[in-house]
Amino acid sequence: MRDFITKHKSYILYFLIYFPMGAICPLIGQYLSSIGFSGTQVGVVTAFGTGAAVIGGMFWGRVYANSRSKRLVIALMFLLAALSSLVSLTITGFLTYTLIYGLLYFNQGPSHGLCDSMVMDKNENFPAIRAMGAIGYAVAVFICGQLAKAMGLRINFVIHAAVFILAALMMKTFTEPSNYSKKHETGEAIKIRELFKDDDFTKLLVFSFFALGPTMANNTYFSYLYIDAGGDLAGVGLAFLLMAGAEAPFMWLVPWLNKRITTEKLIIIGCAAGLIRFLIYSFGPSQGVLLGTFFLQGILNGILLVEVVKYFGKIVPPRLASLSVATYYALGNSFSSIVCNLLGGVIMDAAGIKVTYGFFAALYVISLVLYLVLGLHKER
């Protein structure tokens, strides 16, 4: 058993770190509604959480880039996220809950990007390893959806904390990344402003703002769309099992696809799948259609969540790679989620969940136009 864990530790780690997200993200809106929050308040809480992840990404990204004990930095983030999750169960006040949820995401949000950087630094099979994260997320959504129906939504936060504690223990089995453990060749600490001197990095960051936010916000609002179509919590779990489970095969296919289609071109396919998906959702389809179009999330996330990270790692010098990925998660991913979660909740209260998804579709139109106009489709 020990040999198996040692050989497959990166795969196990990714299963563990995405399982907690699957435990609470798809049903967080339902939990907040159950303790009396309105749609707008749900949007504020989730937007504040991702806002905290932006700040956390900048903070932890620099700490990680300049630390000699990178795996311990990540383990600490896991433990702090677990603690915040448990504390949140004791709170029902809007302002206090918002602050605690922000603290949770301050630590949880950047941890995934830093794990991506660590895996890519070791030259491991990132698409296959990231696919295990998709499987962990899918399994968690299904299991926690069933448990929430039987025991209540609070159990999901306990599971979230317990699995993150396991992930922190798992980090003890890893060795430190080899490249630039503290300072680069000039002897100076790595600083974020170096990234923004690179035009390609800035362009890709702008594109990712429009492309990644809607798919992140979908984790919050899909349950409303599904229940509006007549479904229940167990059905939400099944839907996410299918949708998140579909991501893994596409992530496994990415290396094969890269032999025929470049990263730059694959991203266009992923965005097109996102546009089609949210256009369909904006018409308020039946449960059957929502379940039957699960594969569109597989194409969208299976490609974008792998290829965009690789693209960021590819356009900057190796010594800036970890900070580049952390900054992308903070600004291109989390900051976009702030806008989508906040406006998504406001739009849902004012005009209904179908219009929220129309807004998400519009963002994908913008992302595709920007990607082409900025020349990001050209091979680097």
Image (spheres, rainbow, N blue to C red):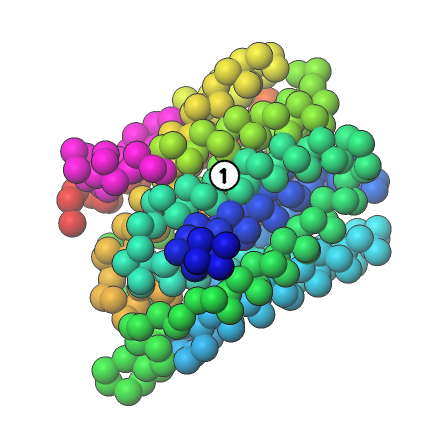
Percent of width and height locating residue 1 = 50, 54
Does residue 200 appear left or right of residue 360 in this picture? Answer: left
Does residue 337 appear left or right of residue 319 in this picture? Answer: right
Residue 368 visible in the picture: no
Q: Secondary structure at mark 1?
A: helix
Identify the magenta region. Answer: 251-274
Q: Main secondary structure of the magenta part?
A: helix
Q: How many marks?
A: 1
Residue 7 visible in the picture: yes
Does 221 appear in magenta? no
In the image, residue 175 sits, relative to residue 313, either above or below, namely below
Asked which quadrant contains residue 313, the reply is bottom left
The residue lying toward the viewer, choosing from 93 and 143, is 143
In the image, residue 169 sits, relative to residue 337, either above or below, namely below
Q: Residue at x 40, y 70 (%)?
A: 175
Q: Residue at x 28, y 80 (%)?
A: 184
Badge 1 density bin: few <14, some 14–19, many ≥20, Cα 10 Å: many
Asked which quadrant contains residue 178, the reply is bottom left
Asked which quadrant contains residue 276, the reply is top left
Does 260 appear in magenta? yes
Percent of width and height locating residue 174 = 44, 67
Does residue 149 appear left or right of residue 121 in this picture? Answer: right
The residue lying toward the viewer, choosing from 320 and 39, is 320
Percent of width and height locating residue 96 = 78, 59
In the image, residue 268 sits, relative to residue 175, either above or below, namely above
Q: Residue at x 84, y 56 (%)?
A: 90
Percent of width and height locating residue 40 = 70, 40
Identified by mark 1, the residue type is Ile
Disc 1 designates what residue? Answer: 135
Q: Residue at x 41, y 41 (%)?
A: 131
